[in-house]
Image (cartoon, coloured by chain):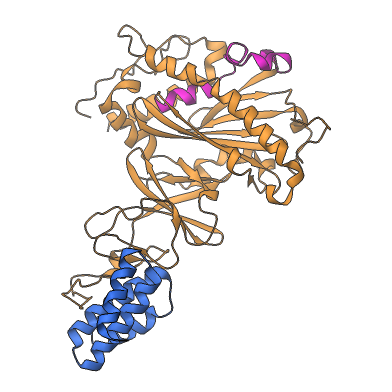
Amino acid sequence: MTLECLNKKILKAHEIKDVPSLGHLYLKAGKLFVDKGDIDHACFLLTAAYVFCLEAGLTEAEDARAILINYGREE
Amino acid sequence: MSGVNSDLSATLKPIGQARGLPNEHYIDDAVFDEEKKVVLFDNWVGIGISSDVPNLGDVFPVEFAGMPLLVVREAKNSVSVYQNTCRHRGMILIEKAGNVRGTIRCPYHSWCYGLDGKLRSTPHAGGPGRNLDKSLDRKQLGLIKINSYVFREVVFVNISGNAPPFVDYASKLINRWREHEKPLFHGGKESSFPFDVACNWKLAVENYCESYHLPWIHPGLNSYSRLEDHYHIEEPGNFAGQGTKVYRQIEDNDGLKFPDFEGLSDFWNKGAEYVAFFPNVLFAAQRDHAYAIILLPQGPNRTIERNEIFYSFDPKERPDLQDLISQNAKLWKGVLEEDIFVVEGMQKGRKGVHFDGGKFAPVMDSPTFVFHDWVAKKIDQSRSL
């Protein structure tokens, strides 16, 4: 999925308050920026992923958290 | 307390000489605020029922006398109550009842709390994408837990946190109704009917305490439950009310009745008791069903009354009793509605500047006096500190 496509889906998910989708989509976007080496922006997106995954009770919250911990951004 | 000038000296006299609480205790904002602290928050108050949160993760916000509270089904058999306020910027966390699948997320900056109240996440608190800050100790920043206890399916809280443990506070009522310590099942949607009443919450307590009004306000009772069939219940400092010796079970045209609570002694075959548990919950104990009325003060002259009926059986497992449950809810709603004009009328009467709190009829009003005396002593003790 391209970043542009992800952004559109994220905006749509915000619009309809689809929290589980927000968790999944931000996680994908965060991982894309990790791959690009833009860690600050990746952690910004992964923080959103972590929050929405937590809110939705998704196990992927731990994936996001693990990456954030790895970069010293979460505990 | 500054700005509060009610004179309680007449209320603190023995019943024969006493007058009721002065008008200010029903119409004055400053006295309402004083009572909020001393009479409500310092004691165990009912705020809802456990079936407000039937499923794990259910959350139910309650504003009790202005205090934002959140009832949470934290575990299958455990209900917790928190202050419904984010520890960050004081945002209200939950405004509508619902189910939280994971964490409680503040809608402002998305600080997240577990159902156990622990602070789980503080997004961007240390800068964008940086969620930590050395000054921010999450262990110290969980939701403020409010002491709570579920008794007869009513969720009680002690907001100030300075009352004795609930089982000590309520020990006399627990002992009196020990035989009724049985599972209670809520009757469902029709068995829950709130009233929005234009009166001070105490007037609903006072009316509930005595049987004196029954022949005049509930004439339908006269045919089978006469005034002389009732007795006073008085536990000064704790609860007051009335009992009847001629309780009659409701039944349908085919003679179908509700099943009794198991193991009750013979007394309860015809006995039933109606008790105002101070300060704000009105209970009924009967052989075949129970109810609780929770008084939610909205200000000096407005009260929401939550009326909730419970049974000895799970209504979902007894479809044959659904019609009778509906009939019973209609019956109680009708009886309890008959009291509304009385409590609203007493509220209006307290605008009379020459009203002196009222002369008690000692024989008939003594349970009501027990409540006045309790309120007056709580306030008097507080003012003398």
Q: Would residue B204 be found to the left or right of residue B285 on screen? A: left
Q: Does the magenta stretch include residue B211?
A: yes
- Coordinates of residue A65 in the picture (x, y in percent): 33, 81
- Chain B's colour? orange
Residue at image position (43%, 71%) is A57
Instruction: Identify the magenta region.
Output: B200-228
Chain displayed in blue: A
Main secondary structure type of the part rendered in magenta? helix
Residue at image position (32%, 13%) is B351
- Coordinates of residue B164 in the picture (x, y in percent): 44, 45
Residue at image position (33%, 9%) is B352
Q: Which of the image's four quarters has the N terminus of chain B? A: top left
Q: Would residue B53 be found to the left or right of residue B350 on screen? A: right
Residue at image position (20%, 87%) is A39
Front position in the image: A32 or B27: A32
Q: Is residue B34 above or below residue A37?
A: above
Determine the residue located farthest toward the right in the rendered image. Answer: B254
Can residue A66 be seen here? The reply is yes
